[in-house]
Image: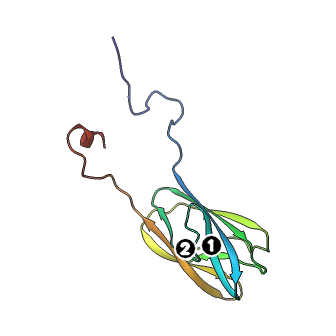
Amino acid sequence: MIGFIGQGNVRHVSIFWQERVEQTVVFEEVDGQVHLRGILGVGGEPNPHLITRTNFAYVLTVINNGETHHRLYIEGLNVQTDLLEPGQQDTITIYPDKEGVYKYFDKRERLEHLGLLEVKSVIPSDEFTGIWNDLI
C-alpha cells in the first residue's frame, strides 16, 4: 500500500526556497558623468534598465567605485541606500507587490536621473495542454 500526502501539510518547515532576484551595480564617473553599471545579474552597459518581478524579494547591492559620495534613490518605491563614500557598498531589499516602472537617481545635493527599474508580474503560461495544464 502506498499513500501520498501533498501540499506540505505534514511538514514542520517549508521546503520551498524564498524566491528573490539579486543584482549588483556600481557607481562610476566617466568624463565627469555619473553612471551606474551592472556587474551581477544585469548587463554591464551604463545605467541599465533593471527588472524584477512582483512577490519576490529584490536584493540590490550598490557599490561606489567613484571618486565622490553617491546615494541610489528609487522614486515611487521611496527606498535609498546610505550615502556611500568611495569604496563603500550598501544593500537594499525591496518587496514589490504591484507592477510599475520607477526612475532611479543619484541623490546627492540634487537628483540626477540615471535609469529605470521595472517591476513585472509573471504568470503561468496557458500553452500547456492535457495533464500538464492540471499541474499548473
Viewed as shown, does residue 88 lie left or right of 52?
Answer: right
Q: Quadrant of residue 94?
A: bottom right
Work out which residue is located at the far left of the displayed protein and give it: 130
Q: Are marks 2 and 1 in contact (CB under 8 Å)?
A: yes
Which residue occupies 36% across, 22% down? 4
Work out which residue is located at the far top of the displayed protein and give it: 1
Viewed as shown, does residue 29 lie left or right of 115?
Answer: right
Image quarter hosting the N terminus: top left
Could you tell which of marks 2 and 1 lies nearer the N-terminus? 1
Name the residue carrying label 2: 48
The amino acid pointed to by label 1 is Arg
Q: Estimate the x, y position of residue 127 in percent, counting from the top left.
A: 24, 51
Name the residue carrying label 1: 37
Image quarter hosting the C terminus: top left
Tell me the crowding category of disc 1: few under 14, some 14 to 19, or many 20 or more residues within 10 angstroms, Cα based. Answer: many
The amino acid pointed to by label 2 is Pro
Q: Nearer the viewer, residue 65 or 116?
A: 65
Which residue occupies 25% across, 47% down? 128
Which residue occupies 65% across, 75% down? 72
Judge whether 20 appears above or below 73 on screen.
above
The tag on residue 81 is: none
Q: Estimate the x, y position of residue 85 in percent, counting from the top left.
A: 79, 74
Secondary structure at numbered mark 1:
strand
